[in-house]
Image: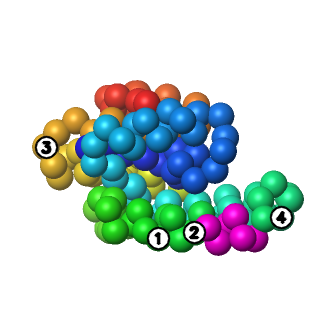
Amino acid sequence: MRFFDASALVKRYTNEPSSAEVERLFGIGPAAISRLSEVEVASALERLLAEGLMTSSDRDRVVAALELDLSTLRIVELTAEVTVVARNLLSRHRLRASDAVQLASCLWLQRELGESIPFTGFDNRLNRAADREGLATK
């Protein structure tokens, strides 16, 4: 299993640098995301639409693809346990709240499954924090 944060998930549905890498990683095995990623991906799509980098029909197509994928992904819900981990991460690393939730979701899943879960994201600060927390990145 591999965890994808929202920055990686967006690349699955758009044509960006590293999109091919994300597609390759998705093909390796089961994938997991935080429930928060649904909102973060929607936000990114609306930003692309507002900036004229995506049409509304492209956005609708991407949303449909995401909704289809949700049935195949392991989704880590935003629970009290995950928020405790996220709060603790904020005291150890300079992270945005949403990034702390993404990282906490991966750490929680790793503990829950009792196996190493690689973290895939495209935010340098978040990846450094993941490295410091002992997660394999990309």
Contact between marks 4 and 3 (CB within 8 A): the answer is no
Give the residue at x 57% y 69%: 63
- Specify the principal SS of the magenta part: helix
- Disc marking residue 114: 3
How far separated are the C-alphas under marks 3 and 1? 28 Å
> Can residue 20 be found in the magenta stretch?
no
The quadrant of the picture occupied by the C terminus is: top left
User: Is residue 83 among the parts visible in the rendering?
Assistant: no
The residue to which callout 1 is attached is 67
What colour-coding does the image apply? rainbow
The residue to which callout 4 is attached is 50
Q: Is residue 50 left or right of residue 42?
A: right
Mark positioned earlier in the residue sequence (3 or 1): 1
- Towards the viewer: 1 or 19: 19
Give the residue at x 43% y 46%: 4
Place of residue 56 in the rendered image (x, y in percent of width and height, measured from the top left): 75, 71
> Which type of secondary structure does the marked residue at label 3 adopt?
loop
